[in-house]
Image (cartoon, rainbow, N blue to C red):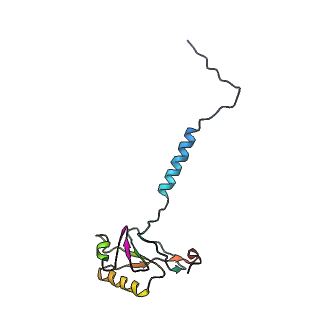
């Protein structure tokens, strides 16, 4: 027995919206995950200005240095004296990037560099911000 399928030609054919909504949400999730996320430190710092910029190697340890000489690595905070306990166990041979506040005393930065040298850190970079990123608070 053959059946006839009747197609109504009265109005426009409506496409289902669910597949389109699914694709939009999948793209949203993809770009949220694939986007570059910057790691936040344990406290805010306002870096000094610079006119040049360089990238950092993947295995770089980011060390936050506040204006009151507080030190932070990942989510841990401490002082310069406690730096050995803040650094990861495999820090030897890895570069360290210092993100210091621009109002930090120079003697404190020198003390931090000396302590890093005592701990055996060989490569240290000071993170700066591009001059255009600084705004008018200075």
Q: Compared to 63, does 37 lie above or below?
A: above
- Secondary structure mainly formed by the magenta segment: loop
Q: Compared to 90, does 18 lie above or below?
A: above
**Residue 38 among those drawn in magenta:** no
Q: Position of residue 135 (x, y in %)?
A: 58, 76
Which quadrant of the rendered structure holds the C terminus? bottom right
Q: Compared to 45, does 4 lie above or below?
A: above
User: 64 or 52, which is in the foreground?
Assistant: 64
Q: How many marks?
A: 0
Decide if residue 57 is on the left or right side of residue 121.
right
At x 38%, y 77%, the residue is: 70
Residue at the outermost front position: 68
Which quadrant of the rendered structure holds the N terminus? top right
User: 68 or 51, which is in the foreground?
Assistant: 68
Residue at the outermost right position: 10
Q: Position of residue 38 (x, y in %)?
A: 46, 65
**Residue 70 among those drawn in magenta:** yes
Q: Compared to 33, does 99 lie above or below?
A: below
Q: Which residues are magenta?
A: 67-76
Q: Position of residue 117 (x, y in %)?
A: 32, 82
At x 29%, y 70%, the residue is: 90
Residue at the outermost top position: 1
Decide if residue 109 is on the left or right side of residue 138.
left
Which of the 4 image quadrants contains residue 41?
A: bottom left
Which of the 4 image quadrants contains residue 132?
A: bottom right
User: 44 or 8, which is in the foreground?
Assistant: 44
Which of the 4 image quadrants contains residue 109?
A: bottom left
């Amino acid at each position: 027995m053959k059946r006839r399928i009747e197609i109504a030609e009265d109005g426009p054919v409506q496409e289902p919206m669910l597949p389109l909504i699914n694709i939009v949400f999948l793209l949203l999730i993809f770009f949220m995950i694939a986007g570059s996320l910057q790691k936040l430190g344990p406290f805010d710092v306002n870096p000094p200005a610079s006119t040049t910029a360089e990238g950092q190697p993947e295995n770089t340890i980011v060390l936050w240095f506040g204006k009151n000489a507080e030190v932070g690595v990942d989510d841990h905070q401490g002082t310069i004296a406690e730096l050995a306990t803040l650094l990861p166990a495999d820090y030897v041979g890895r570069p360290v990037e210092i993100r210091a506040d621009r109002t930090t005393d120079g003697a404190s930065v020198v003390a931090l560099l000396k302590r890093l040298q005592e701990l055996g850190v060989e490569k240290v970079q000071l993170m700066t911000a591009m001059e255009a990123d600084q705004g008018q608070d200075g």
